[in-house]
Amino acid sequence: QVQLVESGGGLVQPGGSLRLSCAASGGIFSAYTMGWYRQAPGMQRKLVASITNGYVTNYAHSVEGRFFISRDNAKNTVYLQMNSLKPEDTAVYYCNGGLHLGPNTAGDYWGQGTQVTVSS
């Protein structure tokens, strides 16, 4: 059974930065595409960024140039560096992973979510 555990969320002022981490256990992390979704109150959960097992990255237009996803297979960990944060980035951020994660398909495995609040 694959488990994903996020950390790094919190409260930050507009223009600030945060780095989220997602540690995986079980499964074959290096084989999976990993991603970060976010869900704001009353909104659908949406894919923010993804990284394939070949290190190809994709970003939602709303975060392109501000957010950066990376992975460390030796540590079974995926990261999301978030810069120039805006109030509209406020959401619960979920780590997701699996063999079939794509633009329209979530992976099989989810973390529990971590709250990111951008406010002055």
Image (cartoon, grey):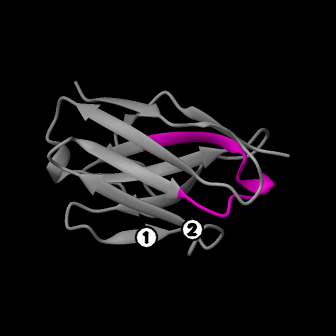
| Three-letter code for the amino acid on which mark 2 is drawn | Ala
Tell me residue 98's x, y (percent). 29, 46
- 10 Å neighbourhood of mark 1: few (<14), some, or many (≥20)? some
Q: Quadrant of residue 64?
A: bottom right
- 10 Å neighbourhood of mark 2: few (<14), some, or many (≥20)? some
From this viewpoint, which residue is outermost toward the top? Answer: 1
3D distance between C-alphas at marks 2 and 1: 7 Å
Q: Name the residue that disc number 1 marks.
A: 58
Q: Quadrant of residue 103?
A: bottom left
Tell me: 20 left or right of 22: right
Tell me: 5 left or right of 85: left
Against 50, residue 118 (above or below) is: above
Q: Quadrant of residue 24?
A: top left
* Residue occupying the point 60% across, 61% down: 83
Front-lying residue, 17 or 100: 17
Check residue 116 for magenta coloring.
no
| Three-letter code for the amino acid on which mark 1 is drawn | Asn
* Residue occupying the point 61% across, 67% down: 63
Tell me residue 50's x, y (percent). 40, 60
Tell me: 82 left or right of 42: left
Per the image, label 2 sits on a secondary structure element best described as loop
Against 113, residue 84 (above or below) is: below
Front-lying residue, 4 or 107: 4
Per the image, label 1 sits on a secondary structure element best described as strand
Which quadrant is home to the N terminus? top left
Q: Name the residue that disc number 2 marks.
A: 60
Provide the residue span drawn in magenta.
Answer: 82-95
* Residue occupying the point 34% across, 48% down: 78
Tell me residue 67's x, y (percent). 53, 64
